[in-house]
Image (cartoon, helix red, strand yellow):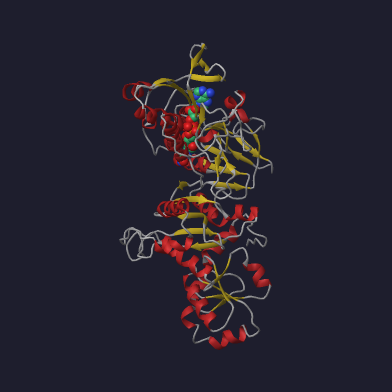
Amino acid sequence: MRTVIVGGVAGGMSAATRLRRLDEDHEIIVCERGRHVSYANCGLPYYLGGVIEERGALILNTPEGLAARFALDVRTGTEVISIDRARQVVVVEEAATGRRYEIGWDRLVLSPGAAPFVPDVPGIERALTLRSVEDMDRIASAIREGDVRSAVVVGAGFIGLEAAENLSHAGLAVDVVELADQVLAPLDPELAQLVANELGDHGIGVHLGAALAKVLADAVELTSGVQLPAGVVVLAIGVRPEASLARAAGLAVGPRGGIKVDARLRTSDDRIYAVGDAVEKEDQLSQEPVLVPLANLANRQGRMVADDIAGKPRPFGPVRGTAIIKVFGQVAAVTGWNEKRLQATGRPYLAVHTHPGSHAGYFPGAEAMALKLLVDPGTGAILGAQGVGGEGVDKRIDVLATAMRAGLPAPSLVDLELAYAPQFASAKDPVNLLGYVVENRLNGSERSVQWHELSARMAGGALLIDARTPAEHAEGHIPGSLNFPLDDLRARRDEIAQLACTGREIIVYCQVGQRAHTATRLLAQWGYEAANLDGGYRTWSAGTSAKTALGPSGERHE
Ligand SMILES: Cc1cc2nc3c(=O)[nH]c(=O)nc-3n(C[C@H](O)[C@H](O)[C@H](O)COP(=O)(O)OP(=O)(O)OC[C@H]3O[C@@H](n4cnc5c(N)ncnc54)[C@H](O)[C@@H]3O)c2cc1C
């Protein structure tokens, strides 16, 4: 039995090595177009910035090493140019010699990945993309040879921001150009703004709502006419599944342009499997096909295909798009849907923002984080989560992604028994805390208002109370708010009675929402209709300084 694998990196190499572990007698041939197999795509940006110093560290294995350990026949510089399904052969072309020949197969695994999207604008030939070791080498020589001092990165997604940070580490003045009006599209604007701030704090120019018009000899020009100096231009505006080989072979391609596979990762021809960035996956919430080009999924799918070929089928489940990035000192992580997507599809949701510390505040070194949880108000199901901050964001999003995968409703987060010592967490872990807030909101013991709903509510007559100290209020507050520090509320009950005598709604905020929660509970017990400004002044500040409006009453402050 012979399996031919197209693509020798994440998905392809996982399939090859797993298959060997399961079947010593199987003939396994891996065809890789590039010069390297089994390289760490995810590490490529870090070599540019000198964070990874040894280029060789990125190349995790070689054809010789794979032959010795796994008895794999790995052919680099070998592109599969067509698939003949009737004759069960692939036609390959050797880059070095131009020689074409056929390889027969019993099973075929496609793991060709995704190709960077390149827009059709004048001068684009000068722009570089970052997908392979060869691409990385090209960017490295461009920045290390000659007198290059500036770079423009087009696209503020995960790869774009990693490239921007590392080009900055390499000593270049960097500008990031992004068509959307926020960085990192999977985040909502009030969290993305924290990442944009971090970029700005490290001297990166962030140009949002800006489109590339042309690439000039030493600059780029935006459609606004603005020119940005660009000794090097890196394009990172997204990837498209490499589905052309499959399409030409008559295999079904789905609505998002990825190869269509079933739960066993079989294409429309059940002798041919496909995995990784090239295939469409099923979204956990909508059950619709989605493209999620992430390494974890490619690796897991590669393994599952090997199991299937070896006669141990195990279905691949729906995905949540769990992802993470570090941008200088800030970590941003996400799982599931964001609020923008929930709004766009009209799906009901409850949003909760918190700002816990990474660990107990009394223990040195605690770092702040912003967490956001999106919950189905009917069932309590977790719809998505996002986090931005320092230490500990990864752990919380991973726990929430696990809860989401397990179908654990958000109120059950209070029951999670998570490891605690003051260096690592608080006795009430930030994940437990999210559960408490959701529980309060779902059982009606606390009402909330979102940052983007506030101006409409105030226009409708709501009274806005700042429950922080006078010093905090003086340092910065929401226009129109009155300062009633939490500890003074009981003593000033009459003043509140006068201000809210007509049944006026009272919205309370503090820095992050915790003191305001105590205040709203008190006000509710006095008979007022009181609501907590979710996430407090911190969320409101970030949200209103973002360029993206969220919700029908999206608001900004200049
Ligand atoms: C710079 C960068 C950083 C990233 N960082 C992260 C990260 O931090 N976290 C994360 O989850 N994901 C990250 N990713 C994405 C992750 O690398 C991919 O999701 C993963 O590699 C996909 O695996 P794959 O097997 O589908 O494709 P790939 O790993 O891209 O492998 C596809 C291979 O197939 C070869 N190929 C294509 N067509 C043919 C053909 N016809 N014949 C022969 N060979 C062919 C290509 O040359 C390529 O080497 C990053 C990607 C890049 C480029």
Q: Is residue 383 left or right of 364 when viewed as pictured? A: right
Query: In this view of the protein, which residue sits in the foreground, 307 or 296?
Result: 307
Front-most of residues 449 and 312: 312
Q: Where does the N terminus fall, quadrant-wise?
A: top left
Residue at 63%, 85% (x, y): give it: 501
Query: Can you see residue 30?
Result: no
Percent position (x, y) of residue 484?
A: 53, 79
- Residue 376 is left or right of residue 57, and the answer is right
Image coordinates of residue 69 in percent, x first then y, are: 32, 25
User: Residue 412: image x %, image y %?
Assistant: 44, 62
Q: Is residue 235 above or below residue 401?
A: above
Q: Residue furthest front?
A: 311
Q: How many marks?
A: 0
The relative height of residue 219 versus residue 28 in the rendered view (above or below) is: below
Question: Residue 20 occupies which quadrant of the picture?
Answer: top left
User: Which residue is located at x 45 percent, y 27 percent?
Assistant: 8
Q: Nearer the viewer, residue 369 or 504?
A: 504
In the rendered view, would you say 405 is above or below 246?
Answer: below
Furthest residue toward bottom: 494
Is residue 133 visible in the rendered image? The answer is yes
Which quadrant of the structure image shows residue 531? bottom right
Please state if 541 lies on the left or on the right of 169 as rendered. Answer: right
In which quadrant will I find the C terminus? Answer: bottom right
**In x, y percent, where is residue 535?**
52, 65
Instruction: Tell me: residue 341, above or below residue 150.
Output: below
